[in-house]
Amino acid sequence: MHENLNDFDSIKGFLDHEEGILLYQMAKKYCIKTFAVEIGSYCGKSACYIGEACKENKTHLVTIDHHRGSEEQQYGEEYFDPEEYDYENERVDTLPSLLKNISRFQLDEYIKVMVETSKSASEKIKNEIDFLFIDGSHTFESARADYESWKEKIRVGGILTIHDIYDSEFEGGQAPREIYEKALGENFKLVKRVKSLVAIEKIS
Ligand SMILES: C[S@@+](CC[C@H](N)C(=O)[O-])C[C@H]1O[C@@H](n2cnc3c(N)ncnc32)[C@H](O)[C@@H]1O
């Protein structure tokens, strides 16, 4: 395993290091035929774990984010970060931090940045993807839209990873868990769970 993995934990973000390791392991194992996609780049923490595996496999990650922040990251909200705010234009802007982190770890060749909404990106990416990570907005509407617009794009034998799965609403929002359970009832089976991150394989 590459020594960079431990360094990725210093990147600002919402991912636990052990969850990052699972993303790396799943991308390393499954991202072998085409490429990987991530919804919700933020400042690039998860992207670097996945990107490192893509580098080793000589493939790439497409990371998608409109960079305007999720609901809870807006000005005055619980996860608002003044360092990621464009005061002149009065909006969240995480793109500069994403680009800086990708370059810091020399992953520019392996991580392709798409500044788009999940929905518009899904209309452009047609290929059968190996690996998908869903970590965008956690409203029920957005999580459902992410799952529905991307699930058919994963190849059979590919992997879907979903972040922020909580077993009760006291621990956290239930939208990611709802799409996880829907996927298990369709054509996905659980491969591994670490903390709030699940990896489920598309079996048919
Ligand atoms: C929880 S953060 C992602 C955290 C990141 N994966 C990490 O490792 O730190 C969610 C991100 O999803 C983005 N986002 C929310 N809704 C989106 C949408 N509809 N399309 C694209 N990006 C979206 C937000 O801008 C935000 O940066």
Image: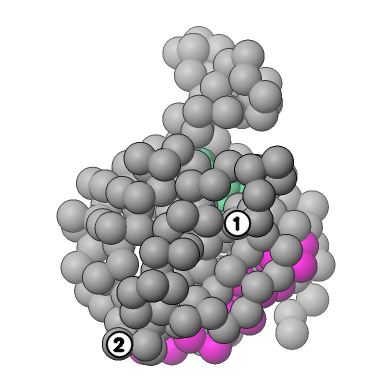
From the image, tell me which residue sits under label 2.
204
Question: Which residues fall within the magenta stretch?
Answer: 17-38
- Which residue type carries mark 1? Ile
Secondary structure mostly taken by the magenta-highlighted segment of the chain: helix
Dot 2, how many residues are within 10 Å of its Cα: few (below 14), some (14-19), or many (20+)? few
Work out whether 153 lies above or below 201. above
Type of the residue with mark 2: Ser
Question: Colour scheme of this structure image?
Answer: one colour
Residue at image point 35% right, 58% down: 147
The residue indicated by pointer 1 is 165
Q: Residue at x 37, y 87 (%)?
A: 203
- Quarter of the image with the C terminus is bottom left
Q: Residue at x 45, y 38 (%)?
A: 139
How far apart are the alpha carbons under marks 2 and 1? 23 Å
Judge left or right: residue 47 versus residue 39. Answer: right
Secondary element under disc 2, as helix, strand or loop, is loop
Q: Tell me how many marks there are.
A: 2
Residue 60 in view, yes or no: no
Q: Foreground: 73 or 58?
A: 73
